[in-house]
Image (spheres, helix red, strand yellow):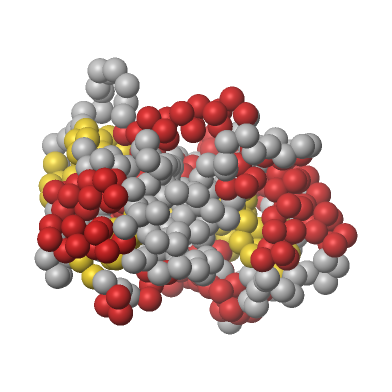
Amino acid sequence: MPDTHALLDALSQALDDATLLKGDAIPAKARSDASLSGRHMPIAYVRPTTVEQVSVALGICNVHQVPVVTQGGMTGLAGGANPVEGAVAISLDRLSGIEEIDTAAGTMTLKAGTVLEVAQKAAEEAGFLLPIDLGARGSCQIGGNIATNAGGIRVIRHGVTRDNILGLEAVLADGTVISSLNRLRKNNTGYDLKHLFVGSEGTLGVITRAVIRLQPLPVGKATALVALLNYDNAVQLLARAQAGLVGLTAFEIMWDSYVSFSSQGEGITLFDRSHPFSVIIEQSGTPDNDALETFLGAMFEEGLIEDALIAQSEKESRQFWAVREGAAYDRLPHLINFDVSIAIGRLGDFAAACEQALREKYPDAHIAFFGHMGDSNLHIAVSVGASDEATLHHVDEITYGVVRDFGGSISAEHGIGVLKRDFLDYSRSPEELALMHAIKKTLDPHGILNPGKVLPPPGTHHEK
């Protein structure tokens, strides 16, 4: 058993009172991320302002073999930032700020605790677009975006977070600082170490700084909401949009059940009648709606779309996106969120099979589908009237079982954390999991970094 008193004494000697919080001074938010699944408060709360303080804190925790969890904006939905019992939490709130925008190279160097929206605005003021964008932009942090390899609404054009990271600085379990802050787009010098930490959810190291690749700031955008009769038409429309619309940045699909609930909750009226599917198409880098209007006119003549609304103002565009972002779902009792990936051509069949499987056990459940169709990412909102641990696990088993049957991924962009950990082998082979455990053992031999997250216990395997 770790000696808690000795640990706290060592941390107190190394860190000042503003950096180390204990007891009642630890904020309530340290208990859980947005999944509200956390059960334990940390025994200490470290708020570093420098990478050196992160290094010192990790080194002490490693010597005492005390678990450590890294916390950012706490917007995750997989329990990845929840402390285990007896853990020290390292909050990156104060390790924030933009260090450099290199306008010649088109890069931004910043600290991990920087809020995404702050970084976006700084890039825009410098004439650039920061390609990473999420609904939680106002509170999520860059370090958390990287640690979970967040996706978002611009993936169809700019890729997931991993695709926009040039370099990283991270601190290993023993306090060793790995500074690989590459600023070059071409750098073929051995193993690309940043990829070890992107998507590792704090299990291999604590990300402290990053270099992000920026894009030219697009001039203007056009946004449309399109109604479709069936999913096959959506697949054809996507292919035509990718081929015929320059600057396609979003292709978001919503099933009718999602649109009806969300639009009613927002008090927004869209089409004059309901449609089985609705798609938001966004085109960036265009000064007006002409190209999008011409494209949609051709699609209407071909019978691919039933109706279309083209935003005539930023206010109308925001209304489309307000329905898509679905804030009304936050008020739905016992909401269970899923974030999966299925091959684009099979997404429609998957949704039908998933709903059928859930309704066999929960016939009165609220089930709605929506997501980033352009990159095969589907979100599922489920409410079965209860949210106790047994019910959650049963709903997970049903949903992830269908994902496995369709050869998909149980996590597209929200990470694994603890809530999806026991189903990781639905999407990864025993050989892959064994290699992951080997990497974890090499970088974190005492297993102090975010224990119990991402990787199921060795040898765990579900029978099909």
Is 215 or 430 nearer to us in this picture?
430
Considering depth in this image, is 341 or 268 the residue closer to the camera? 341
Can residue 38 be seen?
A: yes
Q: Measured from the top left, where is residue 197 in percent x and y? A: 36, 38
Residue 80, given in percent of the width and then of the height, sits at 46, 55
Quadrant of the snapshot with the C terminus: top right
Q: Quadrant of residue 162?
A: top left
In the displayed structure image, the side of residue 102 where residue 165 appears, left or right: right
Residue located at (35% from left, 34% from top): 443
Q: Quadrant of the N terminus?
A: bottom left
**Which is more toward the observer, 74 or 171?**
171
Judge by depth and name the residue closer to the eye, 253 or 169: 169
Up-down relation of residue 272 to residue 118 (above or below): below
Q: Which residue is painted at 73% across and 52% down in the image?
A: 397
Q: Residue 142: image x %, image y %?
A: 31, 53
- From the viewer's perspective, is 452 left or right of 405? left
